[in-house]
């Protein structure tokens, strides 16, 4: 099932989510004037004007704006939570790969010790220890 996406009315009006009613009205007036002038020459300006009117109709009415904010920010929080879970999964996978690689290194070293024999390995360790001292 496809996820329904809410339209970001704040970005349509080019406003932050904390904008007050006066800011919404001023942004609407400025943008609608610009779009009305452009609509004489550009067909897409009419579509943009419809989106602008829709955004203003929702954000200019306090009750509609509260409902929109609840739905919009819930969707945003869910998206951020999904991204955080995905990042955590990537970190977990990377950690598991690192632990597996280190385990492989230890296994190869153990196999080399068995192949060389313990006496050869202890002699090698003594030579390294003497060199370090």
Image (spheres, rainbow, N blue to C red):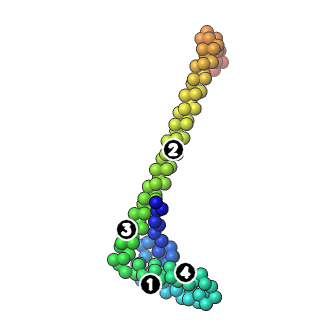
- Which residue corresponds to the image point at 60% horizontal and 18% vertical from the top-left? 111
- Circles 4 and 2: CB atoms closer than 8 Å: no
**Residue at which label 3 appears:** 70
User: Percent position (x, y) of residue 110?
Assistant: 58, 19
**Circle 1 residues within 10 Å: few <14, some 14–19, many ≥20:** some
Quarter of the image where one finds residue 19: bottom left
**Circle 3 residues within 10 Å: few <14, some 14–19, many ≥20:** few
Q: Nearer the viewer, residue 42 or 21?
A: 42
Ranked by sequence position, the earlier of labels 4 and 2 is 4
Ranked by sequence position, the earlier of labels 2 and 3 is 3
Ranked by sequence position, the earlier of labels 4 and 1 is 1
Q: Nearer the viewer, residue 25 or 115?
A: 115
Element at label 2:
helix
- Circles 2 and 1: CB atoms closer than 8 Å: no
Element at label 3:
helix
Quarter of the image where one finds residue 103: top right
**Circle 4 residues within 10 Å: few <14, some 14–19, many ≥20:** some
* 131 horizontally vs 56: left or right: right
Q: Nearer the viewer, residue 4 or 13?
A: 4
- The disc label shown at residue 48, or none: 4
- The disc label shown at residue 91, or none: 2
Q: CA distance from mark 4 to mark 2?
A: 42 Å
- The disc label shown at residue 25, or none: 1
Q: CA distance from mark 4 to mark 3?
A: 24 Å
Element at label 4:
helix
Q: CA distance from mark 3 to mark 1?
A: 21 Å
Quarter of the image where one finds residue 71: bottom left
Task: Indicate whether 81 appears above or below 103.
Answer: below
- So how many labels did they put on this image? 4
User: Percent position (x, y) of residue 114?
Assistant: 60, 14
Q: CA distance from mark 4 to mark 1?
A: 17 Å
- Closer to the observer: label 4 or label 3? 4
């Amino acid at each position: 099932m496809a996820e329904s996406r809410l339209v970001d009315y704040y970005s349509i009006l080019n406003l932050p989510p904390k904008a007050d009613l006066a800011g919404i009205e001023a942004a609407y007036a400025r943008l609608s004037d610009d779009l009305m002038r452009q609509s004489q020459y550009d067909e897409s300006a009419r579509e943009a004007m419809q989106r602008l009117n829709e955004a203003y109709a929702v954000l200019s009415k306090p009750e509609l704006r509260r409902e929109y904010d609840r739905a919009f920010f819930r969707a945003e929080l869910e998206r951020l939570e999904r991204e955080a879970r995905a990042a955590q999964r990537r970190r977990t996978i990377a950690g598991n790969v690192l632990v597996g690689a280190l385990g492989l290194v230890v296994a190869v070293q153990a196999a080399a010790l068995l192949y060389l024999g313990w006496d050869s390995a202890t002699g090698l360790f003594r030579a390294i220890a003497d060199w370090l001292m």
